[in-house]
Amino acid sequence: MTETQPLTSAEARDLLPARTDGPAVAVRRLWDAAAGGPAAADAVVVLTRLDADAWARWRDAGVAAVVAPTGDVDALAESTAAGTGGRGGPARWAVADTRLALARLSRRLDPRPPIAAVGVHPSAVVDPSARLGARVAVGPLAVVAADARIEDDVVIGAGTFVGAGARVGAGTVLRERVVIEDGVVVGRRCHLQAGAVIGGDGFGFAAGPHGAERIHHLGTVVLGDEVEVGANACIDRATLGATVVDARSKIDNLVQIGHNVRIGSDVLIAGQTGIAGSTTVGDRVVIGGAAGVADHVEIGHDVRIAGGAGVTKSVPAGETWGGYPAQPLRRWVRERYLIGRLEAIWAAVKGRV
Amino acid sequence: MTETQPLTSAEARDLLPARTDGPAVAVRRLWDAAAGGPAAADAVVVLTRLDADAWARWRDAGVAAVVAPTGDVDALAESTAAGTGGRGGPARWAVADTRLALARLSRRLDPRPPIAAVGVHPSAVVDPSARLGARVAVGPLAVVAADARIEDDVVIGAGTFVGAGARVGAGTVLRERVVIEDGVVVGRRCHLQAGAVIGGDGFGFAAGPHGAERIHHLGTVVLGDEVEVGANACIDRATLGATVVDARSKIDNLVQIGHNVRIGSDVLIAGQTGIAGSTTVGDRVVIGGAAGVADHVEIGHDVRIAGGAGVTKSVPAGETWGGYPAQPLRRWVRERYLIGRLEAIWAAVKGRV
Amino acid sequence: MTETQPLTSAEARDLLPARTDGPAVAVRRLWDAAAGGPAAADAVVVLTRLDADAWARWRDAGVAAVVAPTGDVDALAESTAAGTGGRGGPARWAVADTRLALARLSRRLDPRPPIAAVGVHPSAVVDPSARLGARVAVGPLAVVAADARIEDDVVIGAGTFVGAGARVGAGTVLRERVVIEDGVVVGRRCHLQAGAVIGGDGFGFAAGPHGAERIHHLGTVVLGDEVEVGANACIDRATLGATVVDARSKIDNLVQIGHNVRIGSDVLIAGQTGIAGSTTVGDRVVIGGAAGVADHVEIGHDVRIAGGAGVTKSVPAGETWGGYPAQPLRRWVRERYLIGRLEAIWAAVKGRV
């Protein structure tokens, strides 16, 4: 753990951004609102709601600052009972979006360096033909194969493998035991969790006279900038061309992305979802956990798919679908309502069956 | 493979526990009841049922002992046709619970040491600041990072990573290529299968002006004593605080446990199930394979969830749920029954539609 | 990347097999039919359909040869408008099965050697008691444990682990970070993608007086020849005896195969599907993605299971099932049709409820 530089009220104003009421303070750590007991004096806590009860709890808890919705902070200031004049209490940092404030505080106050040290660990195996940029960290027992190109400020975790001719963009973090197969392109400032496998062969076979013959996957995978991939998730390489995940899309743990899939930008795909081969997913799509999308379909921009849904056909832009097989959510909800009426229907007709 | 000390009838009496009828024997291996051909003379076979036919098969099969339900052994002894007086045959170890007997015999007769040797393999990378207890085994190419604390009798498999400041309790086995991220706490006598990732970042983002901003997960994961985690399963660290799996809970392969989830004690979660963020699961809950549980719900104590179910809301203690979306099992079964009546309903009403 | 020997029209005739019309050419690479822009002069493109429009596109695209269905090539030759006499254009390789042609071309023209070099990388840890055949490649930081037997022409990727006493058949490729647990038997010419775990302990416990007691899994896993296993997929070892996957079966990414499962030959199992313990799957079965099959059921030969299906009971040979819970496809389709009639049914009866 490294020492984090304290965050002052003045810096918080710009960072969150926030209006900072109360005392000027400096904080070093983010406090868990759900934790009991006394809080650290150098902590800030993010509250999604700050009413009189919450204030009663946090006024004397010992934290240096509370972050809360601007409306709540204003209401509190107006309330005589909850006023703080002359009674001290923590600074109030009023924000428009507590979740965004949490994200920014969590980044700013993260005490963990992404890896212990910069440089190539002596136990790592880096091919002489690989090119490493400035300030690259290669962890213990990592492998960087021939002709791989690692840009500046990349972190390669312990046991991670970067294949021949692969490219890893500046500022990207590959955590432990990641596999980047040969020729794969990873964008800048990406973050791949442990065990992710990018560029495995797609699942493609042809029926031959003596059983299935495998189609060698000669294509690759291209991840845009700021893509995140979860632990043990898999993104297969294309048969020819590339499987693509565009900028800023986030893929959770144990997700499967088939060969030749194209995922747009700013997409969120929750854990254990699978997207079968050659399907396209538009920009800003959100897919819940454990959903499945069939091969060769098109998911339009801004679509939302419910967790657990099984999508068997294309979904027009902007729609929300759920169910198995998936259908527009409103129809699914209506269908569930009607199924709930079956008892009554059955009672009404069974005399005549 | 090491030589296993033979298990005698006398020891079996206490271990299983069993009433041991017939000859006093010693066994060295567990025999597969489903295997054909002659059996080994130093083997014991566990039979879930021992009727006259089974006895005819196993009396002369060559095994040293059969384990069977007490009632079956008694019935057999009473039956003239199946009696063994003067005709030899294997020892009969009569038990109340053949599955428990199987578990205990399998442990007692397991010929595999958890790792080839005790000590730190010369190819492993152990930070000088890590503290290792007595009789710790660190396999080839494993990594133990700074300030990690490995208690007595821990086994760390080949290629496994233990992050900075992590703690692994006494007697725990981490098999190959496990990732224990920094700061994670693993209890005593836990068993983690290959490829499990404990403490990856949770899937949490805030909508920012230029796309999703990641929430750094500053919390950790705490696994209680005797927790088991399957191959390639993932348990994410909390945003703040801890994702918790309590004592004796067993998590199967490819399961996903989201950030800030709290799993009680003695829980069983079968393969490929996912539990989304901030959900709580009570004690003694049993969840079938490939089920999904939404975020921020509460699963009460002793709940049972059917395989494949999609749980979208809280489930009261003691209930059994199934379906997608999940509902009480009895209602789901009734719903399936009513759907099965739809053909008749349709026939009755379609003239009037 | 190595230089691929060019493939001539004459060789293509036997390999695909094809009738080769037009100029005799030699190709070095497979072109992506979906790619825009000019094509490489040494490329061949596989077209699933070759009509006049496609010919207009590819005649002048610069490729050396097009592969297309024989009927399409014949129709084109007969068409005056599309005739090529005197006008050049690429060779036409007429085939009965374009997918099979793609598979064979992709294999023949794959520029990637499965691993950079033959021999044991100096960073690998190979136990002196392990036996390695001829032309075996052991990648960086791989581990081959005691008494393992690696046959000729095996490729062991970076970071892969082969456990004590395991056997890997001739010509098999284990990519990066694969785990083959002790005693597991892998057939010949198998291909295992990165992160696969073969032979982890099955998920089996017995209820003991102080919580679940684990059943040690003393059995093994046996993979037949030409079996393929996807990235991060898991196949558990049997309690006793063996979990078996027969010859030529293909298992996709993140699939879970439970202990004591028996999978026949020529089976295809798509991504994220799970097969629970002790279930048998017949020959030539095809299972879509994210399906689940309960434990202790029998899936007959030639069965087809739809993606996302939840199979809770045995399926007779030759049938196609879908849904959750799964049922014969025709019944599931009918059920979906009847559910679609619920609005009308409800309208007809609700006055009388």
Image (cartoon, coloured by chain):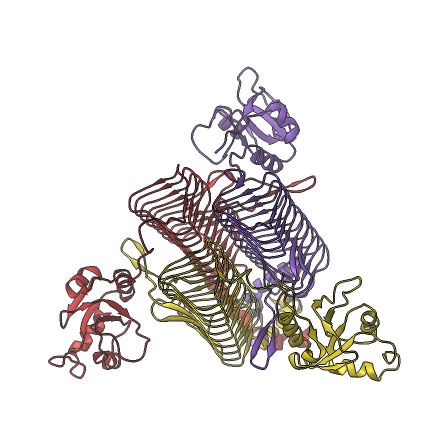
Chain colours: A purple, B red, C yellow
Q: Is residue B56 above or below residue A266?
A: below
Q: Is residue C105 above or below residue A338?
A: below
Pick out the residue farthest to the top. A86
| Residue C34 in picture, x, y percent from top left | 74, 65
Pick out the residue farthest to the left. B86
Regarding residue B352, the answer to whether it shows in the image is yes
Q: Is residue A180 above or below residue B23?
A: above
| Residue C173 in picture, x, y percent from top left | 51, 66
Q: Left or right of B81: which side holds B265?
A: right
| Residue C234 in picture, x, y percent from top left | 46, 62
Q: Left or right of C340: which side holds C178?
A: left
Q: Nearer the viewer, residue A221 or C168?
A: C168
Q: Nearer the viewer, residue A218 or C98?
A: A218
Q: Nearer the viewer, residue C343 or A296?
A: A296
Q: Left or right of B1: which side holds C28?
A: right
Q: Nearer the viewer, residue C7 or C174?
A: C7
Regarding residue C345, the answer to whether it shows in the image is no
What number of labels is visible? 0
Tell me the quarter of the image containing the C terminus of chain A: bottom right
| Residue B223 in picture, x, y percent from top left | 40, 46
